[in-house]
């Protein structure tokens, strides 16, 4: 098993070399290494930044730069009260310009080391020197040679001790975990322990039994097809409410030797109105499966044919890109969709089965490829009318889609996009059984005529059945295509061969479950 940093340690804060201010706190008053950089901060604000950066410095966070997309994460500690705004700040500079982002804790802070993270593409909160502008990021961050943090302590203190401290500074995306075997697989605990107990990057940690993420997780080797096994169950992962990029949080799997198996997963965002998380199963991933998980607050879940979900519940999620994946028995609740937008973008509806979709807004499924699919056991609750932007199914394939519906109670509503047409029907059975009213004996050779009545899709008097009953007294059609309830009328009698029976009427309605009528005929002799 191996866990590696996708990024670089900027400074371990174990020495004052390169820092503008500060001294080293020892005596176990630190997180990583042999110390932390600190300062007495009494009723004031102080900056602690360094020019002693990592091996690839100076850093370029601009579009196309070597550190494009990287985030900045570091450890803060204040032994005194800090203000709610500007108590902790991340700092970057180039020797001429320097500026800061406020990265205050999102909840009540009562001291102790904790990591704060910033997306360098965000607007600065304060320009401390030079000509940088608040809204100029990331274009102006092409030559970062100074990095650190600022701390404001509101009380005045006596004595001389480090009331504010910084420890290890890191830039990057998060962590990669690979290797592992079936007998000794990687787990989220593997990732947590490597970070929180060993390397102290701050990307993946724990709180009250949950794994807390402040960065990405890549599962599988960066290249090649070496074996990588990640198996976990009954775990809880929460993506923290931090100042990260909109699509920064992500779990990404890759590798022809990579197998990921999860059961009873609980994965969520701390506040989906502020940050969401995503999953990408790369096209090279060997297998990915999730069984009976609960996924909350995701943005895009991008899958491949190697992926499968069984019994997973998706709550307040944006979208699933199916790409051949199997979705069996999933439940979709409170999807974060809008009018005319679907939760699942499907290239293979036959791989969506036994699933339940409850309307929130927009469509449940957008079909992107033409063809005929068996659509088995899916239920759509509360969706809008056919043709509306809230219909259950949106055919956006540009052509004909035929859905053969099985094990359902009704036909889902459909909206067709440009050039698209949809046939969605249940293949059901129309069955008439003729019995003798006197002794319930079967009647072979009874003439049956069933016609369409008013109120259905078929024209009135369209012939549905016209033949005689078999040796079991039955006449049936197992291939009736149902789209809406179809009232029927008709008659049945046996009058050409003895014994003879009087004519009896046939009435009823063909539903999704079909029509199964038993008619008791009275003897005419």
Image (spheres, grey):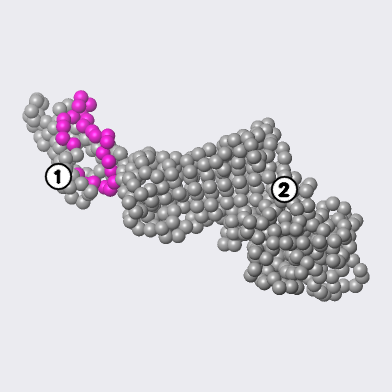
Location of residue 476 with respect to 334 vertically, above or below: above
Residue at (35, 58) in percent of width and height: 388
> Which residue is labeled 2 in the image?
5
**x, y percentage for residue 235?**
64, 45
Residue at position x 51%, y 55% in the image = 318
The residue shown at (84%, 66%) is 20
In the displayed structure, 259 sits above or below 10; it is: above
Q: Whole-percent x and y of residue 50?
A: 81, 62
First in sequence: mark 1 vs mark 2? 2
Q: Secondary structure at mark 1?
A: loop
Question: Magenta stretch containing residue 486, yes or no?
Answer: yes
* For residue 39, side relative to residue 141 (left or right): right
Q: Quadrant of residue 507?
A: top left
Q: Main secondary structure of the magenta part?
A: strand
Above or below for 518 versus 151: above
296 sits left or right of 70 in the view: left
Give the Cα separation between the discs numbered 1 and 2: 73 Å
Magenta extent = 465-488
Location of residue 509 (image quadrant): top left
Residue at 37 percent across and 55 percent down: it is: 391
Pointer 1 residue: 461
Q: Is residue 208 left or right of residue 268?
A: right
Q: Quadrant of the C terminus?
A: top left
Nearest to the observer: residue 502 or residue 209 = 209
Mark 1 or 2: in front is 2
Q: Position of residue 414 (x, y in %)?
A: 35, 51
Identify the element where label 2 is drawn: strand
> Which residue is nearer to you in this view: 524 or 359?
359
């Amino acid at each position: 098993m191996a866990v590696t940093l996708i990024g670089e340690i900027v400074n371990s804060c174990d020495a004052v070399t390169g820092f503008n201010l500060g001294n080293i706190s020892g005596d176990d008053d630190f997180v990583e290494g042999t110390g932390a950089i600190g300062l007495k901060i009494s009723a004031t604000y102080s900056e602690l930044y360094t020019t002693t950066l990592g091996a690839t410095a100076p850093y370029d966070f601009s579009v196309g730069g070597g550190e494009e997309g990287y985030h900045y994460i570091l450890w803060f500690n204040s032994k005194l009260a800090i203000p709610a705004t500007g108590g902790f700040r991340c700092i970057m500079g180039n020797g001429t310009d320097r500026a800061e982002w406020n990265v205050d804790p999102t909840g009540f802070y009562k001291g102790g080391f904790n990591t704060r993270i910033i997306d360098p593409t965000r607007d600065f909160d304060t320009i401390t020197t030079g000509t940088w502008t608040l809204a100029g990021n990331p274009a102006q961050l092409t030559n970062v040679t100074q990095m650190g943090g600022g701390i404001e302590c509101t009380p005045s203190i006596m004595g001389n001790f480090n009331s504010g401290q910084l420890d290890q500074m890191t830039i990057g995306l998060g962590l990669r975990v690979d290797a592992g075997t079936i007998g000794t697989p990687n787990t989220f605990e593997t990732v947590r322990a490597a970070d929180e107990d060993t390397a102290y990057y701050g990307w993946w940690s724990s709180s009250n039994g949950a794994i807390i993420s402040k960065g990405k997780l890549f599962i599988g080797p960066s290249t090649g097809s070496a074996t990588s096994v990640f198996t976990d169950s009954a775990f809880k992962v929460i993506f923290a409410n931090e100042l990260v990029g909109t699509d920064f949080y992500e779990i990404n799997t890759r590798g022809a030797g990579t197998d990921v198996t999860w059961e009873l997963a609980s994965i969520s965002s701390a506040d989906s109105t502020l940050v969401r998380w995503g999953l990408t199963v790369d096209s090279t991933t060997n297998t990915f499966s999730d069984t009976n998980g609960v996924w909350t607050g995701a943005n895009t879940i991008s899958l491949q044919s190697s992926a499968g979900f069984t019994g997973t519940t998706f709550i307040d999620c944006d979208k699933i890109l199916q790409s051949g994946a199997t979705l069996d028995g999933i439940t979709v609740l409170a999807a974060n969709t809008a009018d005319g937008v679907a939760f699942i973008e499907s290239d293979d509806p036959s791989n969506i089965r036994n699933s339940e979709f409850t309307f929130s807004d927009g469509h449940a499924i957008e079909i992107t490829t033409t063809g005929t699919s068996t659509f088995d056991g899916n239920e759509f609750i509360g969706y809008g009318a056919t043709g509306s932007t809230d219909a259950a199914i949106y055919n956006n394939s540009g052509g004909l889609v035929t859905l053969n519906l099985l094990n359902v109670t009704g036909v889902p509503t459909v909206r067709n996009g440009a050039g698209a047409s949809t046939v969605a029907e249940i293949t059901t059975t129309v069955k008439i059984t003729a019995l003798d009213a006197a002794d319930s004996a079967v009647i072979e050779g009874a003439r049956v005529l069933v016609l369409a009545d008013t109120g259905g899709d078929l024209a009135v008097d369209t012939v549905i059945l016209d033949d005689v009953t078999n040796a079991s007294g039955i006449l049936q059609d197992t291939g009736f295509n149902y789209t809406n309830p179809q009232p029927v009328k008709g008659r049945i009698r046996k009058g050409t061969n003895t014994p003879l029976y009087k004519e009896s009427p046939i009435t009823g309605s063909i539903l999704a479950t079909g029509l199964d009528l038993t008619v008791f005929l009275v003897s005419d002799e």
